[in-house]
Image (tube, helix red, strand yellow):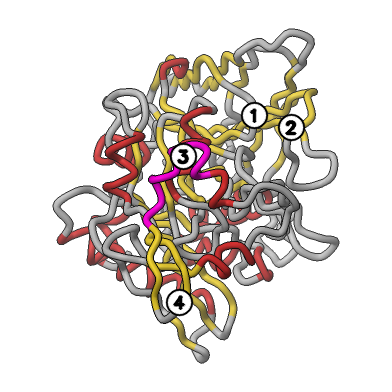
């Protein structure tokens, strides 16, 4: 293994014996967009929506920008982004924060609004220990005109994207991750990067994710309806990508596995389809601040969810037992799939045996012992309750537990 990769790989040490009471973990979304890039609402309105829904933190990950300095948009451009009939963003913001809240300015004969910065939003919306605004950027790279988008959390300056019509997406992903790592080495605070929606425009394969050692986190679920979450008849969905990539990383490349995020990737907030509230993470951070959130994510103290809440995650490394306690919901049943790959899997292009469902357990207290020949073990919990705001047909609420039992 290349020497310069060692500090990066050390960020994801094997998850040892653990007994996590997850009921007090912080709920947060790390991927959403505002008028600062291609969203259609003001950042303060979006933050306020998440706060009102019980989230503890939100990363406003606009494309290639932080909410700093000055950004002016003319009113007509703002209104054109709202596709739904009804109150527009300006009317809604003034109803929520008051008639004098929005800073109106006329420039070159056009009436417009100066957007609020992250610091200005913090002044009115943050509350220590209850709600935190996490600095974030979606580094929107491209290779051969295909998207390679990476969210960067807790950063203090914009990291410029790589756009190269000649480089394949895998190489752009590798170079982007190394650029982020170089910035992290100089940063006064810890930062973390997760790859977004690998199946969007079919830009990245499981083999791409496996090959880039520096990539340690990715979105196993993204709530944008256009990201091909389920795959198609010839290409795997995001969960299968997770298993293929992790099998290759552990068995063939001696890299640590990818850990899975869930996020909204919301862009529209006025009744349109790319809306919030679809996916999030629960994070076992010691404090509700950026440094603590990133350190917990790096340590693997989080799970991803689109609606299922966990009360506990227990991994007994000595006995090889993974146990969960699922928060009960009246009238709702839960089914947990314990998933992994055995060492004797088919390493040819067919990839048979990868992501095997070792066991399916019903109830609120599922438990399973990892097979002796398994490379890793993870769990997906599926509820009998339909998602309240589905991103694909027939979507049920789920939760995804990080892989354990790997070496």
For marks 2 and 4, give the CA distance. Answer: 36 Å
Residue of label 4: 172
Q: Return the x and y of residue 25 as percentages of the image width and height.
A: 42, 23
Residue of label 2: 388
**Mark 1 near mark 3, Cβ–Cβ under 8 Å?**
no
**Mark 3 near mark 4, Cβ–Cβ under 8 Å?**
no
If you read the primary sequence from the N terminus, does the residue marked by circle 2 or circle 1 appear first? 1
For marks 2 and 1, give the CA distance. Answer: 9 Å
Instruction: Write down the region rendered in magenta.
Output: 93-103
For marks 1 and 3, give the CA distance. Answer: 27 Å
Q: Nearer the viewer, residue 118 or 15?
A: 118
Residue of label 3: 406
If you read the primary sequence from the N terminus, does the residue marked by circle 1 or circle 3 appear first? 1
Quadrant showing the C terminus: top left
Instruction: Assess disc 2: are there few (<14), some (14-19) or many (≥20) residues with their C-alpha within 10 Å of its C-alpha.
Output: few
Residue of label 1: 307
Quadrant showing the N terminus: bottom left
Q: Is residue 78 above or below residue 165?
A: above
Secondary structure beneath label 4: helix
For marks 1 and 4, give the CA distance. Answer: 33 Å
Q: Where, by quadrant of the figure, is residue 14 drawn?
A: top left
Q: Residue drawn at (50%, 32%), measured in percent from left and top?
A: 303
If you read the primary sequence from the N terminus, does the residue marked by circle 1 or circle 4 appear first? 4
Q: Is residue 127 magenta?
A: no
Asked if one can make out residue 318 in the rendered structure from this viewpoint, the answer is yes
Q: Nearer the viewer, residue 159 or 401?
A: 159
Q: Return the x and y of residue 49 as percentages of the image width and height.
A: 52, 36
Q: Return the x and y of residue 277 as percentages of the image width and height.
A: 61, 38
Instruction: Assess disc 4: are there few (<14), some (14-19) or many (≥20) residues with their C-alpha within 10 Å of its C-alpha.
Output: many
């Amino acid at each position: 293994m290349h020497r310069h990769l060692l500090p990066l790989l050390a960020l994801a040490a094997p998850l040892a014996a653990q007994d996590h009471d997850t009921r007090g973990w912080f709920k947060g979304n790390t991927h959403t967009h505002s008028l600062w890039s291609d969203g259609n609402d003001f950042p303060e309105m979006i933050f306020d929506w998440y706060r009102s829904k019980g989230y503890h933190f939100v990363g406003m990950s606009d494309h290639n920008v932080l909410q700093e300095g000055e950004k002016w948009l003319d009113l007509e451009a703002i209104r054109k982004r709202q596709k739904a009939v009804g109150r527009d963003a300006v009317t809604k913001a003034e109803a929520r924060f008051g008639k004098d809240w929005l800073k109106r300015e006329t420039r070159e004969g056009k009436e417009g609004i100066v957007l609020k910065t992250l610091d200005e939003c913090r002044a009115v919306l943050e509350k220590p220990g209850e709600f935190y605004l996490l600095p974030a950027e979606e580094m929107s790279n491209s290779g051969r005109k295909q998207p390679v988008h990476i969210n960067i959390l807790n950063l203090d300056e914009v990291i410029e994207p790589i756009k190269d019509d000649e480089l394949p997406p895998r190489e752009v992903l590798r170079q982007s991750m190394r650029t982020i790592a170089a910035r992290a080495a100089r940063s006064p605070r810890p930062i973390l990067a997760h790859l977004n929606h690998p199946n969007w425009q079919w830009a990245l394969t499981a083999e791409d994710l496996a090959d880039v050692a520096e990539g340690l986190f990715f979105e196993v679920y993204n709530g944008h309806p256009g990201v091909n979450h389920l795959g198609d008849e010839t290409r795997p969905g995001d969960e299968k990508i997770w298993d293929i990539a992790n099998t290759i990383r552990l068995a063939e490349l001696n890299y640590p596995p990818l850990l899975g995020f869930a996020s909204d990737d919301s862009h529209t907030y006025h009744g349109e389809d790319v809306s919030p509230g679809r996916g999030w993470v629960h994070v076992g951070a010691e404090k509700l601040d950026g440094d603590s959130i990133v350190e917990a994510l790096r340590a693997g103290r989080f799970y991803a969810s689109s609606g299922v809440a966990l009360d506990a995650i227990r991994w007994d490394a000595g006995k090889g037992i993974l146990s969960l306690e699922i928060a009960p919901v009246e009238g709702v049943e839960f089914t947990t799939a314990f998933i992994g790959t055995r060492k004797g899997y088919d390493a040819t292009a067919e990839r048979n045996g990868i992501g095997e469902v070792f066991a399916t357990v019903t109830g609120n207290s599922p438990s399973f012992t990892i097979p002796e020949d398994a490379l890793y073990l993870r769990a997906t919990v599926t509820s009998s309750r339909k998602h309240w705001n589905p991103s694909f047909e027939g979507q049920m609420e789920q939760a995804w537990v990080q892989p354990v039992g790997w070496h």
